[in-house]
Each structure stands twice: as structure tokens, then as C-alpha cells.
Amino acid sequence: MFDFTSLEKFWNIAEKFVKGGYPTEEDWENFFASKGYKVLTENEFSRKFFIEKITGAVREKTPNDHYTLHFAKALMQRQEIEEFVSSLMKEEEMLTKKAISLALEYLPQNVPKEVPDVSF
């Protein structure tokens, strides 16, 4: 149910910057091909938007807009995020069953029983 591919691609991009380099075109293509960012760039944001915000999060001393600050905080809290992901993965089956059970209490009988992916 949980798909952390987009988060992994974000870490890959961030590591290039942290090491003093810049992501290659292939790195960005892999990033935008991940499920979460693919959906976001098809419906809501441009690729340029993410490139600018992530670059700003790494290079600006004091990010001043919401999105750049969001990515900067993610970079600063990487260890906590990775620990949280690990805990979610350990509980994925239980959380999935609980979510389905709760949803079925409120949804009409004819709703498909397929479990959607949740991308991070």
C-alpha cells in the first residue's frame, strides 16, 4: 500500500547537492518518473517548480517561501523521516487492514474493494 519511491528519489537528488554537485538530467527524469512526483507534475505543478524549490532548499541560507522551506526542513529532518518510514513499513499490514475496515464502515456497498497506493 505504501510507496516511498518518490521520497527515495528526493533523497537521491538531495545527495547530489549535498556533495557539492548538481543532479544530472537522468537524475531529474528518474525523480519525475516516480509515482508521487509524476502525479504532481501532471496535475498541479511544473517540473521547473520542483527544480527551483529543491535547489533553493539546498542552496539558500534562509528559504523564504513555503515550498522551499518544506524541502529544507525535510533535508534537516532526514533521520527522523527515515525512522518514521521504517515504523510505517513495519506496521503496513495492520494499518492497511484498519484503514480498509474504517473506510468500509462509511462507504456504500458497491464501492470497489481495491486498495489504492499511497505515494510519498
Image (spheres, grey):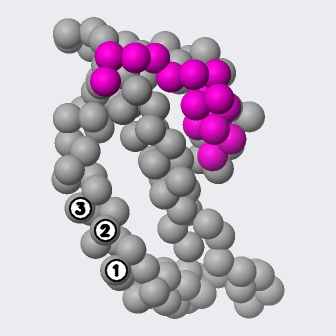
Q: Position of residue 72 (x, y in %)?
A: 28, 27
Q: Amino acid at mark 3?
A: Glu
- Dot 2: within a 10 Å radius of its alpha carbon, few (fewer than 14), some, or many (20 or more) residues? few
Residue at 53% in and 54% down: 5
Residue interval drawn in magenta = 19-34
- The answer for how far apart the CA atoms under marks 1 and 2 are is 6 Å
Mark sitting on residue 90:
1
- Residue 86 lies, with reference to residue 67, above or below; the image says below
Q: Nearer the viewer, residue 26 or 64?
A: 26
**Amino acid bearing label 1:** Lys
Q: Is residue 30 visible?
A: yes
Query: Considering only vertical position in the picture, is 77 above or below 73?
Result: below
Choose top left, top right, bottom left or bottom right for residue 55. Answer: top left
Distance between the alpha carbons at the discs numbered 3 and 1: 11 Å
Q: Position of residue 54 (x, y in %)?
A: 42, 22
| Near-viewer residue (27 or 46) | 27
The three-letter amino acid code for the residue at tag 2 is Ser
- Residue drawn at x 31%, y 68% is 86
Quarter of the picture holding the N terminus = bottom right
Residue 53 visible at all: no
Q: Which residue is mark 2?
A: 86
In the structure shown, which secondary structural element does the residue marked by tag 2 occupy? helix
Query: In the rendering, which numbered label is found on residue 83?
Result: 3
Asked if the residue at tag 2 contacts the one at tag 3, i.e. Cβ–Cβ closer than 8 Å, the answer is: yes
What's the residue at 35%, 71% (across, down)? 88
Q: How far from the left and from the top, in percent, is residue 62?
A: 20, 11
Judge left or right: residue 120 versus residue 90: right
The stretch drawn in magenta includes residue 28: yes
User: Could you say where residue 118 lies in the image, as x and y percent from the top left?
Assistant: 55, 62
